Image: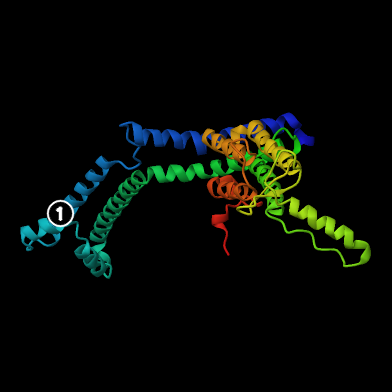
Amino acid sequence: LTKKHGSSYLAKMAFEKAKSLFAEHVEEPMKSIHRELFTRKEREIAADKKARMEAISSLKKMIKSWLDETFPDMPNEEKVNRANSMDMSLIEQTKEDNMKHIYNLNNVVRMSLIEMQFIKKEMMNALISMDELMAANEINMQVAAMTPAVVILYAVRYVFRKIFYALLKIGKSREETFGSFRHVMLDIERLLVMRDNPPLAPPLLSTRANTAMQRGQQKKAVEQQQPFSSNNMTTTSSSSSGECMLNSDDLGMVMLLVHQCRKILQEDGRRFSQSTIRNVSEDLAELAGERGAVTVRQQLQILSRMGRTYPFLKVVSTGVPVKFRVD
């Protein structure tokens, strides 16, 4: 197509198609819904109610006239009732009997015209019923008409986001931002789990050469059971409760990871609500010990509380919430 007409013709044709699609599946349905909900203007009716009433009145007169000429002995009240109810049973039966004799052709033609008038009345009744049905389901039909446009817009948005985030590398999507935050929290939890009251190193083999080294390590292990001080650069534990605290190296690693979380909140703040940013920042400050000294067990409890509180931490790597997973 581009070789035959050129790229300008292709772009023009695509624009015309998009314009037609927008008019048929977006503009007109929206106008119809607005007219239905917010204005007193009624929708256009296809059937003519006045013509229907005239057809019914004409059919009643034709039946009454035919009954007067064909069955003069019939009571007048019965004739009026048959005409008002537009009863065609007697006409059908008489027509069936007269079809056997050719000299009754004029009467057959007259009854056929009455039947045609009856069919006309039924068709106009059907048109009125269709108009009433369409009026009752106007909003539903217009919403259904908008469905293809919504699907196309969602597909275009999905493709554009893939190009915007994956190819151009301009920013991260919501899922990628939440995934980066979860990965940092995972690193913090790994570090804290490994430092949560770890056991002592296994003893060396009992040989003459290792006897003095083993005694020195036992003496050092006893010294590590003392309370935490600024001069102690190793993981220490409380002698009263048995809970350990991070040494300066591990605490610095935690603060580095906390800084990465804060950087994500700062750079991609539009992905989080203001209340979430405020609460997460306070939790990260407690996790880093900025609100007071905390043990490793307390830091793990803070991580557990964050996992229970914030929805973006409950999302698995596929982007599907945990509550929708089927075991």
Q: 125 or 81, which is in the foreground?
A: 125
**Is disc 1 placed on a helix, strand or loop?**
helix
Tell me if residue 241 can be seen: yes
Question: Which color scheme did the rendering employ for the protein?
Answer: rainbow
Q: Where residue 276 sits in the image (x, y, percent)?
A: 54, 37
Q: Where residue 206 sits in the image (x, y, percent)?
A: 87, 67
Residue drawn at point x = 64 percent, y = 50 percent: 238
Q: Amino acid at mark 1?
A: Asn
Q: 34 or 106, which is in the foreground?
A: 34
Q: 92 or 211, which is in the foreground?
A: 211
Residue drawn at point x = 5 percent, y = 61 percent: 75
Q: How many circles with numbers are drawn on the protein?
A: 1
Residue drawn at point x = 19 percent, y = 47 percent: 57
Residue drawn at point x = 43 percent, y = 33 percent: 31
Relative to 222, residue 25 above or below: above
Residue at the outermost right position: 209
Q: Where residue 244 sits in the image (x, y, percent)?
A: 66, 50
The quadrant of the rendering that contains the C terminus is: bottom right
The residue indicated by pointer 1 is 84
Left or right of 94 on screen, residue 287: right
| Category of crowding for the residue at label 1, using alpha-carbon neighbours closer than 10 angstroms: few (below 14), some (14–19), many (at least 20) | some
Q: 145 or 250, which is in the foreground?
A: 250
Relative to 131, residue 31 above or below: above
Left or right of 208 on screen, residue 288: left
Left or right of 302 on screen, residue 72: left
Task: Quadrant for residue 200, please give it.
Answer: bottom right
The quadrant of the rendering that contains the N terminus is: top right
Tell me if residue 1 can be seen: no
Q: Where residue 71 sits in the image (x, y, percent)?
A: 12, 62
Task: Quadrant for residue 263, please give it.
Answer: top right
